[in-house]
Structures are given as C-alpha cells and as structure tokens.
C-alpha cells in the first residue's frame, strides 16, 4: 500500500509527532510519500525549493504560477470529473468565509495532487488537519483520485461540528482521526466516521 501524507508546508513533517507516525507506517511496510501545499503568501518562500529539515523524503513542490496550467490541462483531459470538482469547489466556497479565488487555488492544487498520486500509484491520501489540506484531498478524490482521510484536533471538531464545510469533508472521507487533549495533557486518538 502507498499512502501520501499531505501537509500545508514541508516544515510540518518535521514535527516529532508527525515524523513518529510516518516512521511507524514505513516500518510496517507501507510506502509513504510526503506532499505539501502552499498558501498564496508562500509563493516566493525559499523553503519551497530547499530540502526538508527532517530526514524523511518529501514530495515535489510546485509554484503558484504553474497551478493554472494543471487546472487547464486537467479540464481538457478529464472534463466530466473536472466539472464535478468545479461544482464541489463552488459548494465549498458558498459555505466558507474564504474567497472564491482561494477555492480555485484549492482546486488547482487538487489537480496537481491528482497527477502526483497517479504518477506514484498512491492508494490513499491522509491530510494533516481539517483545513486547507483536507479540502485539497477531498477535491482530488472528486477528480477521481484516491480515497482520503484527515486529522483534526478536538478543538476543531467541537468548535466546528455544525460547520457545513467540515461536515462535507467528514462525509466524503474514508475516516477522520480526532486528536483530543485530556485535562492531564495526554492525547487521546479516536476514529470518526459518518458512513
């Protein structure tokens, strides 16, 4: 099995809790690829082209300027899937406080992720946290990409349980990992599924 681990920035992978989980997966025989998406303000960030500080191999990066090419190419190669993704993206935007432009960027990133996942024969994508990465993973799945799951913190779940955007991502996900801190500071991990 080949799992892609999707984060906002490569630096997220270097966090100890994430590295430990990825090493455990690799040691159990699961192939893991790491991909990152970048917010618009990081387009000129030098870290996009520098090696990751951790010793885990990271996936390719792409500049914001080439996203439009992936969006257009996918529209021509997979027009029906692209249109479904476009409609789902508009649905996300309607229930969001973010701009339509940002949601187009999510869709373009989903097109890039779809291509990477196909090239590397990825079976499943796990997005780290229920924000931008899970939106991109969901849109990639709508394009015909692999199944996805994501991690949310307990505070995200409690504060946003009635959020239609989060509920949409939970409903379409294969599973959701909920990390909740106890009063003693320990972490409890639960699986959440709406299916």
Image (spheres, rainbow, N blue to C red):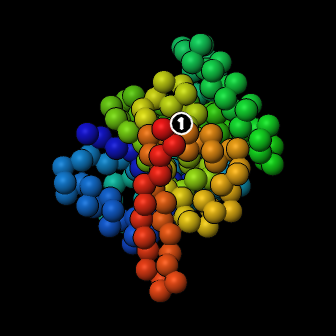
Residue 59 shows in this picture: no
Q: Is residue 179 above or below residue 121?
A: below
Image spot of residue 130 (x, y percent): 58, 53
Image spot of residue 54 (x, y percent): 37, 66
Q: Residue furthest front?
A: 195
Residue 2 shows in this picture: yes
Q: Residue at image x 57%, y 18%?
A: 81
Q: Residue at image x 56%, y 66%?
A: 154
Image spot of residue 105 (x, y percent): 68, 38
The residue closer to the viewer here, 6 or 130, is 130
Q: Residue at image x 59%, y 13%?
A: 80
Quadrant position of residue 53: bottom left
Asked whether, in this view, residue 68 is left or right of residue 133, the answer is: right
Image label count = 1
The residue closer to the viewer here, 190 or 22, is 190
Q: Dot 1 corresponds to which residue?
A: 172
Q: Is residue 80 above or below residue 49?
A: above
Image spot of residue 76 (x, y percent): 59, 13
Disc 1 crowd, CA 10 A, few/some/many (<14, 14-19, 20+):
some
The residue closer to the viewer here, 40 or 110, is 110
Q: Residue at image x 37%, y 29%?
A: 119
Asked whether, in this view, residue 156 is left or right of residue 58, the answer is: right
As helix, strand or loop, the secondary structure at mark 1 comes to helix
Quadrant position of residue 22: bottom left
| Quadrant location of the N terminus in the rendered image | top left
Asked whether, in this view, residue 194 is left or right of residue 92, the answer is: left
């Amino acid at each position: 099995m080949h799992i892609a681990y999707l984060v906002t920035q490569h630096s997220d992978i270097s966090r100890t809790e994430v590295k430990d989980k990825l090493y455990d997966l690799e040691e159990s025989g699961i192939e893991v690829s790491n991909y990152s998406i970048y917010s618009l303000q990081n387009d000129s960030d030098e870290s996009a082209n520098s090696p990751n500080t951790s010793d885990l191999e990271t996936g390719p990066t792409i500049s914001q300027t080439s996203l439009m090419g992936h969006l257009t190419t996918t529209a021509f190669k997979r027009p029906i899937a692209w249109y479904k993704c476009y409609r789902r993206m508009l649905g996300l935007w309607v229930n969001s406080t973010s701009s339509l432009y940002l949601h187009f960027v999510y869709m373009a990133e989903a097109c890039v992720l779809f291509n990477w996942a196909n090239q590397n024969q990825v079976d499943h994508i796990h997005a780290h946290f229920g924000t931008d990465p899970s939106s991109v993973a969901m849109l990639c799945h709508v394009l015909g990409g692999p199944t996805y799951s994501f991690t949310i913190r307990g505070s995200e779940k409690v504060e946003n349980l009635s959020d239609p955007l989060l509920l949409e991502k939970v409903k379409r996900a294969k599973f959701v990992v909920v990390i909740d801190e106890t009063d003693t500071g320990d972490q409890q991990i639960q699986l959440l599924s709406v299916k």
